[in-house]
Amino acid sequence: MWIIAKNLENVLLMTNLPYVPTEYSVKPGLKKLEDDSHFIIDEWYPDYRNEKMDARHESLEKYYIEKPAKTGLHKEERHPTHNALMKTITLWMAETLAKQYRKISFRPQKELYVFHNDYTNESVWVDEDLNVVQTIKSPDFIYSKKRGEKYPKPAYKNLFDAICSQIQEDVCIMRNDELVTNHVCLPSWWSPEEKMGMSMGEIHADVPGMDKTYYEHIWNACLHKGPYLRYNWTLTDTPILNQHPSKNIGKNFDRDSLFLRVERQVLHGFPEIDAVLFLIRTYVGEVRTLEKEQRKTLATAIDNMTDDELYYKGLTNYKDDVTSCLRK
């Protein structure tokens, strides 16, 4: 028998989700981003920060990957064209965050740049290539509420890494319809390492019912007509944000709780460098906080899924239990 959990301690529970699905559809559902809300910083910021620090502590290379150079350069170096791409997008991210939030600033300082974040009390100094020179005004340790451990202050690889570690969004970058950079600490059952180098069509090859010929149109729209906003959703049995496949969590619907996991995705094109930036902000809310009609609509959406779609969402063996739970 399924019971929606009512008392959960020390977990991330949101009661104000930005989107509640009314159907299941494989259509991209792109809508123009009408304001400048590329990034969202809210009261849950410390929890996201802690989860990202947990991921860094586990293995930064597992969650932050850039495409290896295709030339004979040293393995630690990046291709000059890739460097230019990363610099363009990193500068845009720093400047956009500084415009959106007063507590974040980005300014030149002599021959260096300084990215300061009042939310973390960190100032990251970088050179003209955006390599970190020093990080100051940081606490000696970042406290992880989840496990009660203390981590040394982060040793960022570069400014892109520093920014991605201090926002609530995960970040992907595609160039020429090829995934070249992942900074994804909070994945939804996919491996950032395994997706590297794939096209948009290859990344979504296992999505049932998706017209694979449509991806070229999507890519061109994102590149030239954005920025766009879209939402993606699924159900999970835990509010934990980092659901990397290696953790084997999130799809074991045999517990007494049920959560709606929503991704707010912003797609921003850089046509001058043939690149698209993907910002993925994940929200998790307990289904009991939804309105009764919203839960019924969600149950109907699951009822209307094909067998392939149920399998894709991990609901093949749990459809009846889940829909019954939603209709309570």
Image (cartoon, rainbow, N blue to C red):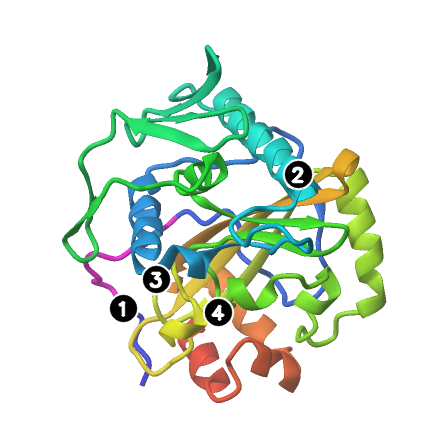
Q: Amino acid at mark 2?
A: Leu
Q: Amino acid at mark 4?
A: Trp
Q: Residue at x 39, y 28 (%)?
A: 133
Label 3 secondary element: loop
Query: Is residue 13 located in the magenta-colored stretch of the structure?
Result: yes
Which of discs 4 and 1 lies nearer the camera? The answer is 4
- Mark 2, residues whose alpha carbon is within 10 Å: few (<14), some, or many (≥20)? some
Residue wearing tag 2: 85
**From mark 4 to mark 1, how far is it between C-alphas?**
23 Å
Q: Amino acid at mark 3?
A: Pro
Label 1 secondary element: loop
Residue wearing tag 3: 239
Q: Is 303 left or right of 166, judged from the image as shown?
A: right
Q: Position of residue 306 (x, y in %)?
A: 66, 82
Q: Split into 4 quadrants, where in the image is the N terminus?
A: bottom left
Which of discs 3 and 4 lies nearer the camera? The answer is 4
Which of discs 3 and 1 lies nearer the camera? The answer is 3
Query: Answer yes or no: do the residues labelled 4 and 1 have beta carbons within 8 Å?
Result: no
Residue wearing tag 4: 189
Which of discs 3 and 2 lies nearer the camera? The answer is 2
Q: Earlier in the sequence, mark 4 or mark 1?
A: 1
Q: Is 237 left or right of 312, judged from the image as shown?
A: left
Which label was assigned to residue 277? none
Label 2 secondary element: helix
**From mark 2 to mark 4, how far is it between C-alphas?**
28 Å
What range of the chain is rendered magenta? 6-15
Residue at the extreme bottom = 317
Query: Is residue 146 located in the magenta-colored stretch of the structure?
Result: no
Label 4 secondary element: loop
Instruction: Say if residue 53 shows up in the picture.
Output: yes
